[in-house]
Amino acid sequence: MLFALLAIAACQADTLPKREKADTLEELTVSATRTNRRVPDEPTRVEVLGREEIAEKLLMTPGDIQMLLNESSGLRVQNTSPSLGSANLRIQGLRGRYTRILTDGLPLAGIQAGGLGLLQIPPMDLGKVEVVKGVASPFYGGSAVGGVVNLVSRAPEGTDLLANATTLGGADLIGWHGGTLSESVTGSILVGLNEQDRRDRDGDGWSDVPGYRRLVARPRATWTGSSGASVFATLGATLEEREGGTLPGQVAPDGQPFPEEIDSQRYDGGLVARIPTGSGVWALRGSVTSQRRDQTRGTERERDRRVSIFSEATRTLPVGSGALVLGAAAEGDLYRNTDIAGFDDDQWTLGGFGQFDWDPTERLGVTLTARVDHHNKAGTFLSPRVAARWRLDDTWTVRLSAGSGFVAPTPFIEETEAIGLARLEPLSGLRSERLVGGTLDLGGTLAGVELNATLFGSLLRDPIGLRPSATPERVELANATERTETGGAELLARAHAGPVTFTFTWTGLFATEVAPDDSLRQRVPLNPRHALGLVTVWEHEKGRIGLETFFTGTQRLDDNPYRTESPSYLIVGLLAEQVVGPLRLFLNFENLTDRRQTRWDPIVRPTRADDGRWTVDLWAPSEGRVVNGGIRWSP
């Protein structure tokens, strides 16, 4: 039925009205690389998810940006705690701790946005998402060694209200309003209420879908002066209670209840100022984020507070046919734990950087970047990067980039998101991780089809991982003696047939590392060898129908008592939206094939692991088929 509708729509391309797109590639500018160039002129490949894509994913998961990022080629949202649903973002096979998440150029979710960060950012107030894959440390320091995602707020105009409910007991109520406050001041405010009931999908007494209740509020304001100067300010508050583990009255395999809970409070504030002076521009950025968490895992309790401080000043000057950016930055990451000794820490990084954008000819563009960072615990590091763009003709462009970066040791990695710090030995003798990587990109149009192909690779020296310690039922972090090697390719193809758009993506990935005991080289776990997606959308001024199909290939599994390699699986989704005046009615069928991990194996282990976990890693969805629907009012 759906395919018949799509075929009819394609045949009627000349008679059906087309929805006007908010942005085109030629008009989009990107700020993630600092100089606000148009996308076609940028030597660094920056992928931009526009407002239309954001609006579509808003109807599927109104409360977070997981799906928005997870369905882009080369990106994978990886669950790090099956019981509580924590997740981070892997870019081109690198673990999530190497990815930096920014909001309007500020780390409002903290220096590291893993854990619950991705789950607490609603997409309603986003105008676009900029993604830089590969080494971005020369732009944004050590935590961006694998790439950066910049969430850019939407223009403060209009009103948006959305109410949503799901078949798994989830509900969302989100409102946004933006407008003019005075002749020189505009502003917006977002308020969201989200909740989800705990669900046990396979009847084993353990939560396969964590429950939560969350409140999010974010006001923004921008002042613009007559001289072109501007000041942007934002505040944010996120309050959440989340629960998982055994359900009330149920027990783990050892016969004891094992509830897991985390209450979190995050407050942040940020400021961005642009001041034109003479022939150049000053840009000042600063933010402070404070997060408190109270976590319970069985009988173990952890209460902690983490404060992240960020400041940066840059000066941009025109130089011939290019632009020079000089800047300095300071970051602080302050951590205190009430219940576990040995992890209180203050880490500070001071950095200076320079960037030269040069366009010697219309066809050639080059960006040279170098950054020096001094970390109070790890030492001093140089992070260089070069990117070049060459237009082969009016259609095809080649981009090449290479660079290096560093990551200072930290106890906050994927594994500790699941186990906490109670069984972790205090850090000792760790070396900083160093990464060298590069990408080669070819993009253009062939017979009306937009095509982009990318080759990527990286070498990570001294990777830090978790291994058993000499003390029973304890674990420790240690550097591996061999480097982690990652390589692969991506392909994007997009075609339009009247009101129908077809988007195909493929990522092939081969990443290897040594085992924790340095005994052998093996595939990096939880990295699919192949991932494919086909999205078909038919849209017009009265609505849209979207069909999504995603294939996930085999993944190596680590410390899984049921299997060493996951099977491949296919997920199909269907979205329908109808516009009635200012109202949009929507119905979304997610995971129609009902693929969930417990259809193959249990999530709960037969015995508790040395690191304290009762669950295996998630390599497939845990919630299975979900239907959600609701109404959106956009006058």
Image (spheres, rainbow, N blue to C red):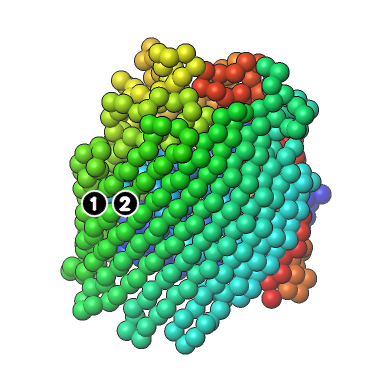
In depth, the one of 211 and 307 nearer the eye is: 307
In the image, what residue type sits under mark 1? Answer: Gly
Residue at figure coordinates x 76%, y 74% from the top left: 581
Residue at figure coordinates x 37%, y 38% from the top left: 344
In depth, the one of 241 and 338 nearer the eye is: 338
In the image, what residue type sits under mark 2? Answer: Glu
Query: Which residue position is annotated with label 2?
Result: 331
Question: Which one is closest to the eye, mark 2 or mark 1?
Answer: 2
Would you say the residues marked 2 and 1 are in contact, meaning their CB atoms lie under 8 Å apart? Answer: yes
Q: Using the rendered view, name the quadrant where residue 603 is placed.
A: top right
In depth, the one of 390 and 388 nearer the eye is: 388
* Mark 2, secondary structure of its residue: strand
Q: Position of residue 513 (x, y in %)?
A: 39, 23
Residue 119, labelled with which disc? none
Marker count (numbered): 2
Q: Specify few, some or many for label 1: CA neighbours under 10 Å numbering under 14, 14-19, or 20 or more.
A: many
Query: Which residue position is annotated with label 1?
Result: 351
- Please report whichever mark, 2 or 1, sits nearer to the chain's N-terminal start: 2
Left or right of residue 597, residue 389 in this image: left
* Mark 1, secondary structure of its residue: strand
